[in-house]
């Protein structure tokens, strides 16, 4: 019985040794322009979804916007659609429709499965930072100059965007 146990133990050590010594999978990182075009496709899709979902609001209040303090109901709902689209598409498929069309996806830095916390920081917090102050849109250019083609939102979420 001891020899079976020792054989099993040696086999486990060999598997562990192979995993540790195997080279890390090489990825081709998606650059600024590829990600820009994917984002543009996504924005067109989001505008289309918003047009379908929010057009009934035109028949309320004689076509005038429903205001809630500084914001409008239409603006709030459009913002929710925007963030929910990126959040759920990235969590569910590791890519949005724009990324699917161009053959790129989001992976975690250490190649584990994407967690909700990673996606929340990347897609909500990171995009919020880009969208709140117009000048921060220029921070997307960081992607063009970083070694692993990471944007600020990728750094916040510990993610990379790679070619499939």
Image (tube, rainbow, N blue to C red):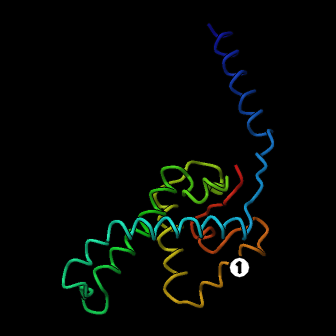
Q: Quadrant of residue 38?
A: bottom right
Q: Quadrant of residue 18?
A: top right
Q: Residue at x 50, y 61 (%)?
A: 119
Using residue 32 as the reference point, say whether residue 38 is left or right of it. left
Q: Report x, y in % for residue 79.
A: 39, 75
Q: Residue at x 70, y 56 (%)?
A: 162
Using residue 141 as the reference point, say whether residue 136 is left or right of it. left
The number of numbered discs placed on residues in the rendered structure image is 1
Q: Report x, y in % for residue 27.
A: 76, 52
Q: Secondary structure at mark 1?
A: helix
Depth check, front residue: 142 or 115? 142
**From the viewer's perspective, is residue 13 above or below residue 151?**
above
**From the viewer's perspective, is residue 6 above or below residue 93?**
above
Q: Report x, y in % for residue 143.
A: 71, 73
Residue furthest left in the image: 61
Depth check, front residue: 94 or 10? 94
Q: Residue at x 58, y 70 (%)?
A: 156
Callout 1 environment at 10 Å: few (<14), some (14 to 19), or many (20+)? Answer: some
Q: Report x, y in % for residue 3.
A: 68, 9
The residue under label 1 is: 141
Depth check, front residue: 46 or 15? 46
**From the viewer's perspective, is residue 6 above or below residue 130?**
above
Q: Residue at x 25, y 92 (%)?
A: 69
Image quarter hosting the N terminus: top right
Using residue 97 as the reference point, say whether residue 78 is left or right of it. left
């Amino acid at each position: 019985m001891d020899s079976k146990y020792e054989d099993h133990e040696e086999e486990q050590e060999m598997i562990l040794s192979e995993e540790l010594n195997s080279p890390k999978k090489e990825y081709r990182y998606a650059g600024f322009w590829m990600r820009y075009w994917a984002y543009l496709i996504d924005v067109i899709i989001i505008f289309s979804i918003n047009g379908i979902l929010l057009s009934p609001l035109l028949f309320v209040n004689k076509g005038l916007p429903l205001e809630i303090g500084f914001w409008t109901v239409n603006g709030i709902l459009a913002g929710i659609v925007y963030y929910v689209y990126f959040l759920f598409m990235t969590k569910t498929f590791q890519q949005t429709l724009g990324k699917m069309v161009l053959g790129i996806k989001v992976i975690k830095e250490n190649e584990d499965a994407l967690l909700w916390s990673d996606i929340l920081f990347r897609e909500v917090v990171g995009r919020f930072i880009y969208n709140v102050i117009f000048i921060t849109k220029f921070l997307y250019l960081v992607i063009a100059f970083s070694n692993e083609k990471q944007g600020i939102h990728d750094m916040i979420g510990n993610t990379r965007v790679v070619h499939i």
